[in-house]
Amino acid sequence: EEAAQTLHRETGMDMKPAMDEARSYTHSPTYYMAYYIGKLAIMQLREEAEEALGPKFSLDFFHTTLVNAGCMPMSFMRRALALRMWEKYNIYLGPQAESLTQFATRMASQGRV
């Protein structure tokens, strides 16, 4: 019930669907974690793209590149973004700066996740 209340409060979801969601979390507790890990990976990729592109960065460019790349593992999404950055701006994205665990720890310490 506490999880349903949190969903209701944080997302505005009606209580009945929130209860159903919370119940499904208890049946497959790690399933939904994959969404959070994906969110963190996209946040990390965005931060690195912003740093590499500087004032040339735009959310439209970032989102369009990821959406056009389709549904694929994050390592391939990174490659798609790196190629697009090189094609459009002649800017190299470079290797991943830190592990996802390090990124998540840093974001948590800053209160950003």
Image (cartoon, rainbow, N blue to C red):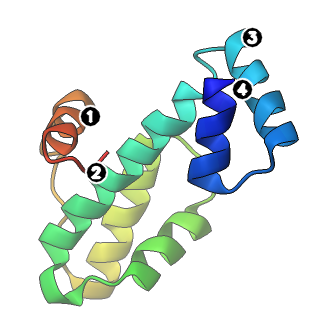
The numbered disc on residue 44 is: 2
On screen, 25 above or below 63?
above
Name the amino acid type tagged 2.
Answer: Gln
Residue for badge 1: 100
Is 102 placed above or below 74 here?
above
Question: Which residue is identified by label 3?
Answer: 27
Query: Could you tell which of marks 1 and 2 lies nearer the N-terminus?
Result: 2
Residue 76: % across, % down: 45, 47
Residue neighbourhood size for the residue with mark 3, other residues' Cα within 10 Å, grouped as few (<14), some (14–19), many (≥20): few
Task: Find numbered disc 3 in the image and state the secondary structure of the residue it sits on.
Answer: helix
The image shows residue 65 at horizontal and vertical percentages of 48, 72
Camera-side mark, 4 or 1: 4
Q: CA–CA distance between discs 2 and 4?
A: 28 Å
**Residue at x 62%, y 28% (from the top left corner):** 3
Q: Secondary structure at mark 1?
A: helix
Q: Are marks 1 and 2 in contact (CB under 8 Å)?
A: yes
- Give the alpha-carbon distance from disc 1 to disc 3, as whole Å: 26 Å
